[in-house]
Amino acid sequence: MNGTIYSVITGTGSYIPTKCVRNEDFLNNEFYEIDGKKLDKSNQEIIDKFLEITTIAERRYVTDDLTTSDIAYYSAVDAIKSANIDKEELDYIIVAHNFGDVKAGNKQLDIVPSLAARVKHKLEIKNPYTVAYDLPFGCPGWLQGIIQADYFIKSGDAKKILVIGTDILSRISDPHDRDSMLYADGAGATILEAKKSDTPIGILAHKTRSDTFLYSKMLFMGKSYNPDIENKDDSFLKMNGRKLYQYALENVPQAIKDCLEKSNTHLSEIKKVLIHQANGKMDDAMLARLYKLYDIADLPENIMPMTVSWLGNSSVATIPTLLDLVLKGKLEPYKINKGDTFVFASVGAGMNINALTYKM
């Protein structure tokens, strides 16, 4: 068959941890300000306000016996089965994460060997030409992995690629920081394959930006807000929430618009917006700002599938998990049909933003 080579999603998978942690489970936490002083509000007030500004009511944590590469492996098995491919034919395994295999009770960074190498080992792939490597890129890591895979496929270097987003944030979040209620665990995997077509399909265009000069410290590792914590040398994920919110609102909608223009697609043609599940209210605000850029006042119904209210923010795992649930009919009423054009977008530590236009 003649035609242009496109990168097409042929399989998806995810691992949603079994432990459900509700907002009420934080009622006994001791929360502190950045200066080490205890918050003067009751935990009920803190939790109620948190729900109001994030829409997060619960999240999922892994059990103590699992690591980040374990759940990455489970999502990979699911995706390979979904794509119905021979795992030995994979040209690349790209694993996006941010903290390596953090073990329960041990926060020491563990990334040797790479998580991708561990996943390949767990999959029992013998092919030495299945190249496995990791990609740390903040929350947009999975989407950046998809973008890199597209380059490999378009160049003729690869035909089948497995891209995974996996993180366990529950083990690196400060229990004395209100922001710890944002974070969750999970893994999502995607199979991309090279397909020839006379008409555009699969990945149509993508756009990435890194704003490090002014915004590199929006997310960082720091000490617990509790000055009396037992292990004072432990580092936890910290963020400047207000500035991050403003940065995302000002830049993500424009990045999506830039990507759509690159693919010669108008926003009115987009059937779904699959955005990183960081904060429900923030995602709503970014969507409204995106449509405002096109002078569209009325947002279409069911345009933006959401999981953050019950899965929390699992970083690189949010979008591939969301995609898997939608494509497998597990997130009613959201559906993606053959011929639909949709857009991915993510923002996170770096600060990094990326967007990608895709046609089923």
Image (cartoon, rainbow, N blue to C red):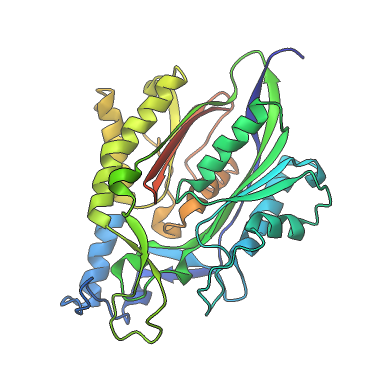
Instruction: Tell me residue 198's x, y (percent).
Output: 66, 13
Q: Quadrant of residue 313?
A: bottom left
Q: Nearer the viewer, residue 266 or 232?
A: 232
Q: Which residue lies at the image location 75% right of the left edge and 42% below the top edge?
A: 90
Q: Nearer the viewer, residue 13 or 301?
A: 13
Instruction: Tell me residue 356's x, y (percent).
Output: 48, 32
Q: Which residue lies at the image location 52% right of the left edge and 41% below the top edge?
A: 144
Left or right side of 53 for 172: right
The answer to whether residue 300 is seen in the rendering is no
Q: Quadrant of residue 257?
A: top left
Vertical position of residue 66 compared to residue 340: above or below: below
The answer to whether residue 278 is seen in the rendering is yes
Vertical position of residue 27 compared to residue 117: above or below: below
Left or right side of 92 for 217: left
Instruction: Tell me residue 92's x, y (percent).
Output: 70, 43
Q: Which residue lies at the image location 50% right of the left edge and 74% below the top edge?
A: 107
Left or right side of 234 for 85: right
Q: Nearer the viewer, residue 28 or 1?
A: 1
